[in-house]
Image: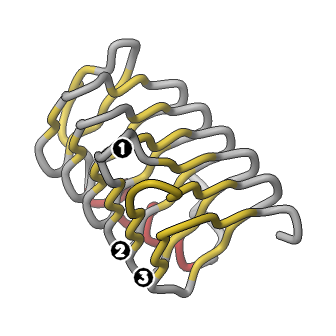
């Protein structure tokens, strides 16, 4: 979007979509983002001091999400309003539900479905949920359920 901003040491492999008012701020440390990335309206990615933010391939961030000095594995989805804080790690194929708070230093294994504040692993993600994340990143319309 014309009002999306990428500042500093940010690397985006692409293709990528940054919606309106999205901000990637890497002014004191790096932000690294893999291929096939989607960042929703009003979302932000930034670093924490000397803690970089590393985002894998096939990642989808919803509207008003924050990724702050964390690591998101391949195929991760952070739904609207989700917050992922400093030093945390969210494994590949995981979903942070809408409004979930992944607290500082938290670690979640691959294929975790994370809910709540503080975020907790409720269960494993399903094949359909991981496929839905891939569809969202590729721009295909979601499957009606």
Image coordinates for residue 125, horizontal then vertical, percent: 25, 46
Q: Can residue 136 be seen in this view?
A: no
- In the displayed structure, 107 sits above or below 74; it is above
Residue placed under numbered mark 2 in the picture: 57
Label 1 – label 2 distance at C-alpha: 17 Å
Discs 2, 3 touching: Cβ within 8 Å:
yes
Question: Which residue was labeled with disc 3?
Answer: 35
Where residue 89 appears, as percent x and y from the top left, is: 21, 43
For this view, does 69 lie left or right of residue 98?
left
The image position of residue 101, as x and y in percent, is 41, 23
Residue drawn where x is 46% and y is 43% of the image = 67
Q: In which quarter of the image is the N terminus?
A: bottom right
**Left or right relative to 5: residue 96:** left
- Circles 3, 1 touching at the beta carbon (< 8 Å): no
Pick whichever, 51 or 70, lies toward us. 51
SS for dot 1: loop
Q: Give the secondary structure at mark 3.
A: loop
Mark 2 surroundings within 10 Å by alpha-carbon count, few (fewer than 14), some (14 through 19), many (20 or more): many
Give the Cα separation between the discs numbered 2 and 3.
5 Å
Residue 90 vs residue 135: left or right? left
Specify which label sits upstream in the sequence, 3 or 1: 3
Residue displayed at 43% across by 71% down: 134
Picture layout, residue 12 above or below residue 49: below
- Residue 140 locus on image (x, y percent): 62, 77
Which residue is the site of mark 1?
69
Q: Which residue is drawn at 11% across and 44% down?
A: 109
Q: Looking at the image, is 14 positioned above or below residue 37?
A: below
């Amino acid at each position: 979007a014309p009002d999306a901003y990428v500042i500093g040491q940010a690397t985006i492999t692409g293709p990528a979509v940054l919606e309106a008012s999205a901000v990637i701020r890497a002014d004191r440390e790096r932000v690294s983002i893999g291929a096939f990335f989607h960042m929703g309206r009003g979302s932000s990615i930034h670093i924490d001091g000397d803690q970089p933010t590393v985002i894998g391939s096939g990642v989808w961030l919803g509207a008003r999400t924050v990724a702050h000095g964390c690591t998101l594995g391949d195929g991760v989805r952070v739904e609207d309003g989700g917050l992922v804080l400093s030093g945390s790690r969210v494994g590949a194929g995981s979903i942070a539900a809408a409004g979930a708070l992944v607290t500082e230093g938290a670690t979640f294994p691959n294929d975790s479905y994370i809910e709540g504040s503080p975020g907790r692993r409720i269960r494993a993600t399903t094949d359909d949920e991981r496929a839905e994340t891939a569809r969202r990143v590729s721009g295909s319309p979601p499957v009606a359920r």
